[in-house]
Image (tube, rainbow, N blue to C red):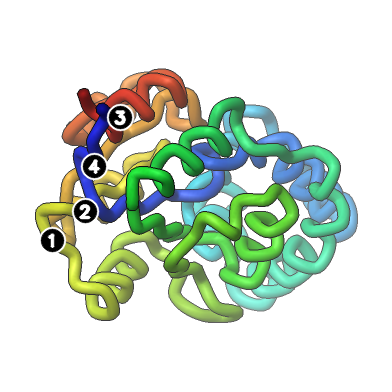
Amino acid sequence: MAALRYRRVFFDLDGTLIDTAPGIIASMNRMLEIRSLPPINMEQHMALIGPPLQLGFSEVLGLSGEELSEAIRVYRDIMPDISRELIAPFGGVIELLDALKRHGAFIGVITSKQQSTAIEQLDHFGIWKYVDYIMGAEPNGEGEKTALMKKAGSEIAFDDDCVMIGDRFYDINGAKAVGIASIGVSYGYAPEGELEGCKPTFIANTVGELQGLLLTD
């Protein structure tokens, strides 16, 4: 019978549990139109998926000050409605979460996405019922992944029985900062070679491989 490799399992959201890229790209394009900003290419779009909005909009779009704040406000306002029908869980994610729960896992979500939006998306796709803990960004609050991981650790005391799963180096570095294991998922949005470069404990290429790492014989 399979057994849990880690008793407490923490997931990133975008690019790990939910394929949000189509919704994010559509929302980003609409925000650029509303704010009369120049269009961006696909490489820039993908670079915006993962980091907190303040960082991504600053580094990728070159925004600062009031222009940065207003772009974030518009994006957050329009994103839920535009993206709702464009995003979905990755294939096998619901089955994975169900299997983890049946084996007694504690499941958490730690995301740079605004927490209220994350909860809405998790609930919309039937994932929220599996979640025991969530840590997300608050409006105008901290959204950097390592800071969120440290804040979560102060609330739930990470130990050797914990693992963080994510698709970007932010997730892996956050796990290292709090001293827990990590699994990078290459089916997400990381550029080629990024996960290998930050050296997670394991890399899973598919949701099926991820399940095999979390539930061992």
Nearest to viewer (mark 3 / mark 2)? 2
Label 2 belongs to which residue?
162
Q: Is residue 45 among the parts visible in the rendering?
A: no
In front of the other: 65 or 195: 195
Tag on residue 195? 3
Residue at left offset 57%, top offset 70%: 115
Secondary structure beneath dot 4 equals: strand
Q: Is residue 63 above or below residue 184?
A: below
Nearest to viewer (mark 1 / mark 3)? 1
User: How far, Cα to Cα, is label 2 from label 4?
Assistant: 9 Å
In the image, 105: left or right of 201? Answer: right
Q: Between disc 1 and disc 3, whose residue precedes?
A: 1
State if disc 2 and disc 1 touch (CB < 8 Å). yes
Residue at left offset 24%, top offset 71%: 153
Label 4 belongs to which residue?
182
In front of the other: 63 or 57: 57
Q: Between disc 4 and disc 1, whose residue precedes?
A: 1
Q: Is residue 58 among the parts visible in the rendering?
A: yes
Quadrant position of the N terminus in the picture:
top left
